[in-house]
Amino acid sequence: MSNAASPPAPPAIVDSHCHLDFPDFDGEHDALIDRARAAGVTRMVTICTRLRQEPRVRALAERYAGVFYAAGTHPMSAAEEPMATVDQLVALSAHPKFVGIGETGLDYHYTADSAALQAESLAVHIEAARRTGLPLIIHSRDADGDMARILADEHRAGAFSCVMHCFTSGAALARTALDLGFYLSISGIAAFPRSTDLRAIFAAAPLDRILVETDSPYLAPPPHRGKRNEPAYAAKTAAILAEALGMDYPQFAARTSANFDRLFPKAAP
């Protein structure tokens, strides 16, 4: 019988944005959650991107301890999906594990032709965030100017909380978001070797406004880049960013987890 002590548990950290309902993970959820917990990823928010799929996403949150969910219409789907209503999103927020509104936002990379519909959908989600007090989850790509303007104008019209998920935009949008009291979320992209400018944006941001995410199954950090991402890899992204910011990993994990609790109080321990 061995008297060797068990290895210490890894620092607890949160994956603030993943997509557990995507077919990439079909049939693997038990193992996926086990690997995440073994890596210290004790909580995660799985995001519904099309409201007709909300029951499937909700079921995952109900099945697993530590899994929470949010729902909205992804901007790239704004032209394909029925326009969400404020009342619809407010009704979803009654669920105890529904913790955020979105993801929503603007994406002009492939879907600039639906910019007007995206902005209309974004306004609906912002009003739902105001009414529920839940944080808005923003996706922004190739739309920095419009996104900064809309967020600033809407915030002046009525405050709301927000995270810029998978932040990869420029320093100007980062400053606008931070000035509004919003949070920036680090994904595996920030861990890529060439992402020096992006890491500089996070290094300049207040430490109490940074979250960690995977956006899995996308954007796996090194050494898994180009492969399927999963919630366990939030710990790998966080370790790389902690080193880049000159922090030890347990401290960075604790600080970003505390930030998550502040922004997503329904998911706090």
Image (tube, helix red, strand yellow):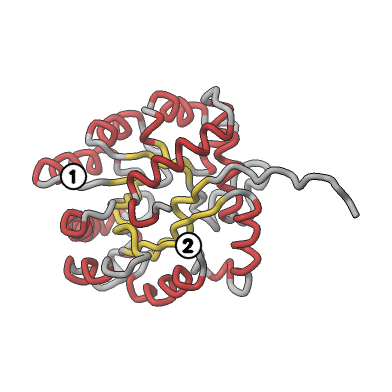
Foreground of the two, 147 or 64: 64
Q: Is residue 202 visible?
A: yes
| Left or right of residue 255: residue 72 | left
Residue type at the position of mark 1: Ile
Residue for point 41% across, 61% down: 47
Say the numbered circle drawn on residue 67: 2
* Mark 1 or mark 2, whichever is nearer to me: 2
Tell me if 38 is positioned left or right of 155 in this view: right
Tag 1, which secondary structure? helix
Amino acid on which disc 2 is placed: Val
Position of residue 92 measured from the top left corner of the image (x, y, whole percent): 28, 70
Q: Is residue 191 left or right of residue 76?
A: right
* Lower position in the chain sequence, tag 1 or tag 2: 2
Measured as percent of width and height from the top left, residue 210 is found at 41, 37
Q: At x 30% / y 56%, what residue is drawn?
A: 104
| Foreground pick, 93 / 220 | 93
Q: Nearer the viewer, residue 91 or 251?
A: 251
Is residue 45 positioned above or below 249 on the image?
Answer: below
Please tell me whether residue 53 is drawn above or below residue 250 in the rendered image: below
- The image quadrant of residue 248 is top right
Residue at far right of view: 1
User: Please, which residue is most extreme toward the left here?
Assistant: 157
In the image, is residue 58 above or below residue 162?
below
Residue appearing at x 46%, y 31% in the figure: 198
Quadrant occupied by the N terminus: bottom right
Q: Residues within 10 Å of mark 1 (few under 14, many from 20)?
A: some
Residue 200 position by quadrant: top left
Q: Which mark is residue 31?
A: none
Mark 2 neighbour class, 10 Å CA radius: few under 14, some 14 to 19, many 20 or more:
many
Residue 29 percent location from the top left of the image = 59, 69
Q: What number is the disc on residue 150?
A: 1
Label 1, label 2: how many angstroms apart (C-alpha)?
A: 31 Å
